[in-house]
Image (cartoon, rainbow, N blue to C red):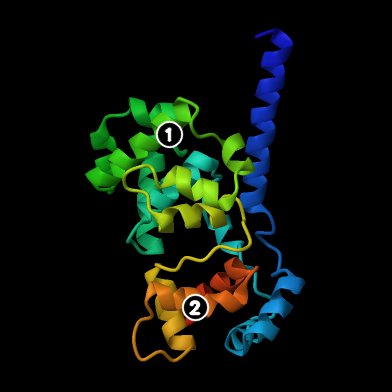
Amino acid sequence: MTLKAEADALAGVVRAKRALDGRARRGASAVADPTAREFLRRADPVLGGLIDARPDFQPRAWLNELPPLDAFGTLIFQVIGQQLSVSATRTIVSRLQERFGGHMPSPQELLAADPQELRASGMSNRKGATLRALAERFLDGQLSDESLARMTDEAIEAALTEIPGIGPWTAHGFLIVALDRPDVLLSGDLALRRAVQRAYVFDHLPTEDEMVQVAERWRPYRSLAVSYLFASEFEKGT
């Protein structure tokens, strides 16, 4: 590879990382997109009530409470958060940062670390093994900020769920958090299912199939609908 080709390749990676971080942070202090909000209000009266109750809703404001995250960092966050509350996830992430000099580990740093360092931060051995498998894929080029930013939602889900310990919930969360994809549903998320049960007056916790059915009317803005429902769930005690 010539010097110019190497420089061009490096520039492409830098641009992709900036784009990825920009998507993750984009609109973090902005109110919900008015076109999407109005579509959802008209498509679903129940959701419309949640929307009307939050006229200044900022669906991505919670990202301000997280450290800067590239693709690998976002996946660390998602894997740690599997089956944990948001507060427990943030506690483990904070401990992990402390063990890596105040920042999220890069793939190289994570693979070089003793697995017990991950365990000591509060994550299980299984999650540690999943993160190490992820790090290997970033190092060997199977995954990268650039390639993930260019892939379709379906291709990203397929690539990530090949890794043991990563299922649709983690992949879909990555699409929302890292890439700000607009039409993603976390059908298996327990907090979201509880929010739907309460808002739509189910007499039982809705199944994933029922979640998909309810959410069909939200297309192509399921991600924003999910944000409103999460807000209703997390605010219910306030």
Residue 189 got which mark?
Answer: none
In the rendering, at what x and y percent does residue 16 appear?
Answer: 66, 36
Residue 213 got which mark?
Answer: 2
**Residue lying farthest to the top in this orientation:** 2
Q: Quadrant of the N terminus?
A: top right
Vertical position of residue 47 compared to residue 130: above or below: below
Question: Label 2: few (<14), some or many (≥20) within 10 Å?
Answer: few
Residue 101 got which mark?
Answer: 1
Q: Amino acid at mark 1?
A: Gly
For this rendering, which residue is in front, 151 or 94?
151
Helix, strand or loop for disc 2: helix
Q: Is residue 9 left or right of residue 196?
A: right
Please report the residue visible at 37 percent of the width from the left and 71 percent of the height from the top.
Answer: 190
One can see residue 159 in this view:
yes
Q: Is residue 195 left or right of residue 27?
A: left
Q: Quadrant of residue 27?
A: bottom right
Q: Quadrant of residue 2?
A: top right
One can see residue 238 in this view:
no
Vertical position of residue 116 compared to residue 27: above or below: above
Please report the residue visible at 58 percent of the width from the left and 88 percent of the height from the top.
Answer: 46
Please report the residue visible at 37 percent of the width from the left and 49 percent of the height from the top.
Answer: 166
Vertical position of residue 67 compared to residue 230: above or below: above
Question: Label 1: few (<14), some or many (≥20) within 10 Å?
Answer: few
For this rendering, which residue is in front, 235 or 230?
230
Q: Is residue 92 left or right of residue 68?
A: left
Q: Amino acid at mark 2?
A: Gln
- Which mark sits nearer the N-terminus, 1 or 2? 1
In the rendering, at what x and y percent does residue 49 appear?
Answer: 61, 88
Helix, strand or loop for disc 1: loop
Q: Are the residues at dot 1 and dot 2 in contact (C-beta closer than 8 Å)?
A: no
Q: Is residue 220 left or right of residue 95?
A: right
